[in-house]
Image: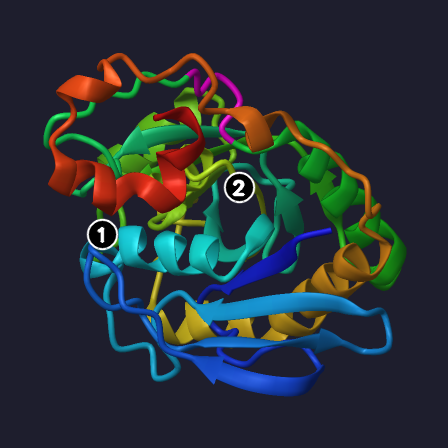
Amino acid sequence: MGTIGFIGGSGIYEALPLNDVREVEFDTPYGEPSDAVTIGEFGDTGREVAFLPRHGSSHGVSPTDLPYRANMYALKKAGVIHVFASNAVGSLKEELEPGTLVVPDQIYDRTKGRDLSFYGDGVVVHQPFADPYSPELVDHLTDAAESSTSADTGVVKGGTYVCIEGPQYSTRAESEFYKRQGWDLVGMTAIPEAKLAREAEIAYATIAGVTDYDVWKEDSEVTLEEVLENAEQNQTAIKAAVEEAVRTLPEDLECDAHTALEGTVNTPTEAIPEETKERVEPLLGDYL
């Protein structure tokens, strides 16, 4: 099987327990990734894992400015075919209290100025994105979370993650609007990460740890102190879930995402500029 990727969100800046560790700095056409990619063997499983802290090891990059394309391109170059990500999120529902783990299956995009695609510059790619998280990994990651966490940790499968621009938290009017739509979580990093994973034919799912109630809830004020405190408390359960997901991932698991580029390139190969072909070759090479 290919390499398994793990993208650590807020509060998770260190890799899973790995052997024969090496730090690899990837040079990409989209700039430098958030950090070096830590690659090693997970326990005695023989499974290679590539870890990347989304915001860098010192959390030095805001959600708006993250090098999402460089990060996913680096993981692709590392041979990653499945990615488990983690997110710190606000809750839009009373029952999703801080400390709950959610494996969402939908995203609503409220970002404004991010680079959403690897493509362009002479190559047009139109992909289906109805199910932004790979259903096969959503099922697997949920099972792993349920079997690895303590009985008092709530695990919820499914739900909609509304991705806001940030780095500011929501206004009260925005938060109340999101809640009225029936959405479940609010965060800042699902987009374009999920879109880029699909464009790279990487199966992708995330486990989100609830840190707060956003500001729709009466007397609720989101503070960095609250978010960081709860993110730290959630990280043990999140890491346990990801470790179990890596340990038990079927070696022959095929996901629809692994062939997601088939029939999506709208530009004849001969019309694509050579410079663009070279840039996207690690992603689109099988289809050009």
The image's mark for residue 166 is 1
Which residues are the magenta region? 128-132
In the rendered view, tell whether residue 26 sits above or below residue 4.
below
Question: Residue 90: horizontal and vertical position, in percent?
Answer: 45, 50
Q: Nearer the viewer, residue 256 or 148?
A: 256
Tell me if mark 2 has few (under 14), some (14-19) or many (20+) residues whose alpha carbon lies within 10 angstroms of its own: many
Distance CA(mark 2)–CA(mark 1): 26 Å
Residue found at x 46% / y 52% = 76
Q: Amino acid at mark 1?
A: Gly
Tell me if mark 1 has few (under 14), some (14-19) or many (20+) residues whose alpha carbon lies within 10 angstroms of its own: some
In the rendered view, tell whether residue 204 sits above or below residue 134.
below
- Does 151 sit left or right of 207 as displayed? right
Location of mark 2 (residue): 202
Residue found at x 31% / y 30% = 109
Q: Is residue 164 visible?
A: no
Q: Nearer the viewer, residue 199 or 173?
A: 199
